[in-house]
Image: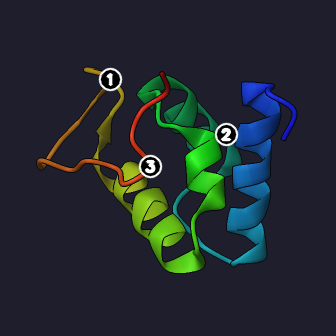
Amino acid sequence: MNGNIFEDIASVTNRIDKLKLTYGDRISTFMDLEYSNVDVRKLLSFDDFNFIHDIAGIARNFNRKTKRFDNCFTPRCGFRP
C-alpha cells in the first residue's frame, strides 16, 4: 500500500473477488468504502474472518443517503483519521 486511498480500496475489492464474496458489485463496494470513511488500510490487515465481518456489515448497513451506518453497526476497522 502506497498511501493512495483509491488503490487501497481497489486492493479491498480484489480481495473480495479472491475470497469469492458476493456483497454487491465492485463499484458499490468502492463507493461504500470511500463514503463511509472506514480505515481501509486496517481493513486490509485483518484476517479473513474479521475482513468478511466488516465487508458484510458495511454492505448490509451503510446508508448511502445519510452516509452513516444503520442497525448500530460499527466496523472493526474503525474510521480514517
At x 42%, y 32%, the residue is 79
Question: What mark, if any, has residue 27 been given in the picture?
Answer: 2
- Decide which of 80, 7 is in the foreground and name it: 80
Give whichever of discs 1 and 3 has the lower sequence position: 1
At x 48%, y 21%, the residue is 81
- 79 vs 20: above or below: above
Q: For this view, does 79 lie left or right of residue 7? A: left
Give whichever of discs 1 and 2 has the lower sequence position: 2
**Circle 1: residue type:** Lys
For label 3, the residue is: 77
Q: CA distance from mark 2 to mark 3?
A: 20 Å
- 49 vs 58: above or below: below
Disc 1, disc 2: CB below 8 Å?
A: no
Question: What element does badge 3 sit on?
Answer: loop
User: Where in the figure is residue 61, as x and y percent of width and height?
Assistant: 28, 48
Give whichever of discs 2 and 3 has the lower sequence position: 2
Q: Which tag is nearer the camera, tag 1 or tag 2? A: 1
For label 1, the residue is: 67
Question: What mark, if any, has residue 6 been given in the picture?
Answer: none
Q: CA distance from mark 1 to mark 3?
A: 17 Å
Question: What element does badge 1 sit on?
Answer: loop
